[in-house]
Amino acid sequence: MTARPLLVLALCLTTALPAVAEVPLTVQTVVARTAPLMVTFELSGTIEATENIPVSFRNGGRVIGIEVQVGDHVTEGQILARVDPTQTEAAARAAEAQLAAAEASLKQAQLAHDRAKGLAERGAGTRADLDQAIQALLAATSSRDQARAALAKARQAVADTIIHASASGIVTERTAEPGQVVSAAQAVLTIARDGLREAVFHAPDLPELDGLIGHDLVLRTLDGPEQRFPATVSDISPLADEDSGTVEVKARLLQEDLQPGLGAAVSSIFELSDAETISLPWTALATLDNKPAVWVVDPDTHTVHLTPVEVQSYTSATIELSGGIADGTIVAASGSHLLYPDRLVAPAGDRK
C-alpha cells in the first residue's frame, strides 16, 4: 500500500474516534464566610486585694513596737504599732499646765470685770475702767480657748503614737522594725482589706483589650488541687508598662465566700474579637507569582482558577484573609498541588 492511502486512512480513523473527556478531580471544597477573628490566649496572674491600706504614724518617731507579722489577720481597732510617746506626753503635760494658767487668768479677769461693772453702776468707777476690764476679760477668754485647743492637739499626738487598724484584713507587708525612726506618713505596714479579691494579669498591648471590660472569666488555680472561680474583668490600665510592654488587666472575683488566698497563682483564657476576616484551612493555600493565592471553583463550570489573596494572619490550622475573595466564594480546600487553571473538579463536600 502506498503512503498516500495510509495517510488518508489514518485521518479517517482519527475523525471517527470520539474525544476523550477529562475526568473530574475530586476535591474537598469550603465556602468562604466572613466572620470576626477571635484571638485566644491564656495568661497567668496572682490574686491580690482590691484595696490595700498603707499604715503609718501621723507624726513619726522612734518605733518601740510592732504587734503583728506579715500574714496575720487583724480586726478593726486592733493595736498594730507604737512609737516612743515620751516627747508627746511631755508636750501634753505642758499643754495642761498652760490651760490651768489660762483658766486662772480668766478667773482673775472675770473678777476684775465684775468689780469694774459694779463700780460703774454705782457711779464710783469710770467708763474707761469698765472698757479696760472688758478687754482684759475677752483676752483671757481667748487665751483659755487657745490653751484648750493646744491641749486637745497634744492629747491627739499622744494617741497618734499608737496605730489602730482602720479595717479588718491581712497584713501583706511590714517595712519597719522596733528601734527604727520613721517620719510622718511613712508606711510601716500594709493591710489587704477583707472583701472581694481580684486577679492581676499582664497582657500583651493589643488595641482590642478595651473590649474586655465586663467580660466574664473563669480563673483556674495553678498550685495544689485545681479549683475554678468566676470573675469579671474590672479594670484595664490605660498605659503599657515601660519595661515589659505589657498592660495590667484586673479581674474581680464574684463570690466573697469562694475565692483563693492572697498571692495564689491563677490562669485564665482570654478571647479578643479582631477585625472581620475570611477563615480558610491552611491546606487551601497556594501561590501565584510567589504570593498567596487560592483555587476558586466556578459553580457553573466546576473548573478552577487561581486567585491572589491578602493574608492577615496565620494560625496553626487556618489562614485568615483580609481580601482577595468575596463572601460565599467556593474554594478548593485540598489538593492544590494537583490543580491547574481550568481543571475540572468534582466537589466531595464542603468542609465546615
Image: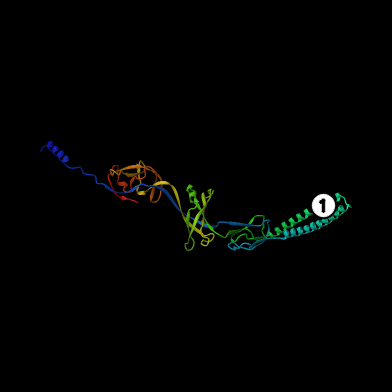
Instruction: Please provide percent x and percent y for residue 92.
Output: 74, 59
In this figure, which residue is indicated by the disc labeled 1?
134
Q: Does 24 sit left or right of 218 as displayed?
A: left
Taking 65 as reference, is 130 above or below it? above
Residue name at image x 76 percent, y 58 percent: 95
Residue type beneath disc 1:
Ile
Name the one closer to the observer, 192 or 8: 192
Instruction: Please provide percent x and percent y for residue 103.
Output: 79, 58
Name the one closer to the observer, 161 or 210: 210
Asked whether the viewer can see residue 249, the reply is no
Q: Classify mark 1: residues with Cα within 10 Å, few (<14), some (14-19) or many (20+).
A: some
Residue furthest to the front: 122
Residue name at image x 48 percent, y 47 percent: 207
Asked whether the viewer can see residue 233, the reply is yes
Choose top left, top right, bottom left or bottom right for residue 88. bottom right
- The secondary element bearing badge 1 is classed as helix
Q: Does 153 sit left or right of 205 as displayed?
A: right
Residue furthest to the left: 1
Instruction: Please provide percent x and percent y for residue 227.
Output: 47, 62
Quadrant (top left/top right/bottom left/bottom right) for the N terminus = top left
Instruction: Please provide percent x and percent y for residue 129.
Output: 86, 51
